[in-house]
Amino acid sequence: MRLAWREAVMAFRRAPMLNALSITTIAFSLFAFGLFGLVALNMSQALTRLEDRVEIRAFLGDGTASEAAATALGDITAFPEVASAALVTPQQALDRARKELGEFNDVFDAGLLPSSIDIHLKPGFRDPEHVRAVAARIKTYDFIEDVRFGEEWVEKLHQIRNIATLAGTALGLTFAIVAVIIIGSTIRMAILARAREIAIMRLVGATDRFIRAPFLIEGSLKGTLGGVLALLLTWATNEIIGRVAFSAAFFDLRLSILGIFAGALIGLGGSAFSVGRHLRDV
Amino acid sequence: MIRFTRVRKEYPRTGVALNDVSFQVNQGEFVFLTGPSGAGKSTILKMIFADELPTSGEVKVANVSSATLKHRDVARLRRKLGIVFQDFRLLEDRTVEANVSFALEVTGAPRSVIGSRVARVLTQVGLSSKARALPTELSGGEQQRVAIARALVNDPVVLLADEPTGNLDERATRGVFELLRDINATGTAVMMATHNLELVKRSDCRTLEINRGQLVFDSHEPMTGQGER
């Protein structure tokens, strides 16, 4: 293993230009993928923020006993889809209406508005199907007069989420495939440049495993370095956008490490594939 | 030690390269493989180090048969052989010493053994003073000596040389040939493909002549190196 590491490091030192070129190619391929990831991340966060506003409002009938409302509130809070539920008194409803809608500024009688239970759903349960199911369950309380959740808006939001997910997956896959192809070709070039060395290794009795090991180490190292460089480029781009246009979210530590790990994995996979193919062909 | 039994080799594009070739080389022999270019000399050598497999017939080398040879056995077989080519096939970015030790490292030999064995073979080929030189800093004859040192370092049972003097001037040719005879004298069988008929004539070694893929002449006088000297 020590020999394999030595060979891998020597390969770096022997052809610094070629190796710098392949690391840069890997970095730019992953950078394109990283930029796409950044757009996808920000879109997803924007949609999640919109979805946070999905709310079911269950209006209580006049004269509903406060004990009954409290029991219902407890029941609803315990629904698996529900993140939180709160009882809103007529006065609280009026305050909110005044804040949100100017025309309520002249209304002073809180009795005009009904009490309600306002329900927020957990992420993953904000699609029309779940929202409708929860609303239907709430409606079964006989003191609930009406349940509203902006059905049309929830439907549209869900459609946007679906389109974004589909487009994101297709684009992401395309970027990933292009990155893998470019990285694979880069590694293949590096292996072809050392075809003579591989042939000599075979002549003196090196096993395929022995020949493969330094290439796998080299591929992972290049992938990792490419990944780090791509992350730095993506970060720098994000910073520039933040200064000249708008502030956008960046990958957290987990995603950043995952990105570098993906680079290492592509480097390793690309090398394993290319060197395996080369060893089969010669 | 090397046995060809009714070996035929056919390539899909170029047709028959060897046809019904049978011969045996015993331990400690020095054998010339002669014949015009394209006669099949290199194909025979390639079959010995399992770079090619026969289309029919059997090649048996150091008790390994082509009939039962598996891909994973090839590396093990090659460690028992030393192979030298006309174009030396050295790693040009590594020193003489590194080129030779490389052949031992791939076998997983311990580091303590590598140093002394490399020094020994470099002395044997007369290059101990050039251990730190790069192949490009050496003459053709010296480069071929490095290739021979690399081939020797694993103590092979047979040394295969494919036109080892093809790129060398007369003096270097003589030097390399002398070296191969010295190696043979220590008990290592040597099989040398050449079209240098002068060299063949001057020596009294066994000669196999190949023409158009067929063995047309075998002087069949197995001689050990020890016996000659």
Image (cartoon, helix red, strand yellow):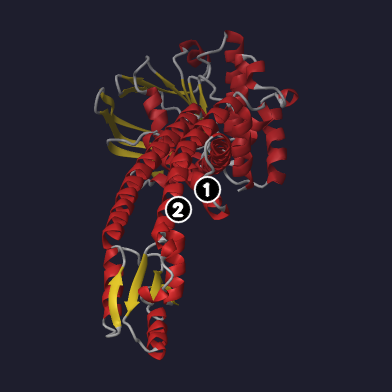
Q: Secondary structure at mark 1?
A: loop
Depth check, front residue: B179 or B30: B179
Spatial CA distance of label 2 from label 1 is 8 Å
The image quadrant of residue A59 is: bottom left
Instruction: Count all numbered tags in the image, as a single digit.
Output: 2
Q: Are marks 2 and 1 in contact (CB under 8 Å)?
A: yes
- Which residue extends farthest right? B129
- Residue B173 vs A133, above or below: the answer is above
Q: Chain of mark 2?
A: A
Tell me the amino acid under the disc marked 2: Gln
Depth check, front residue: A10 or A227: A227
Disc 2 or 1, which lies upstream in sequence?
Answer: 2
* Residue B29 visible (yes or no): no
Residue A110: image location, x then y, percent? 42, 74
Residue B128: image location, x then y, percent? 73, 26
Badge 2 local density, few (<14 within 10 Å), some, or many (20+)?
Answer: some
Per the image, the residue denoted by label 2 is: A45
- Residue A152 vs A261, above or below: the answer is below
* Residue B73 visible (yes or no): yes
Tell me the amino acid under the disc marked 1: Ala
Per the image, the residue denoted by label 1 is: A249
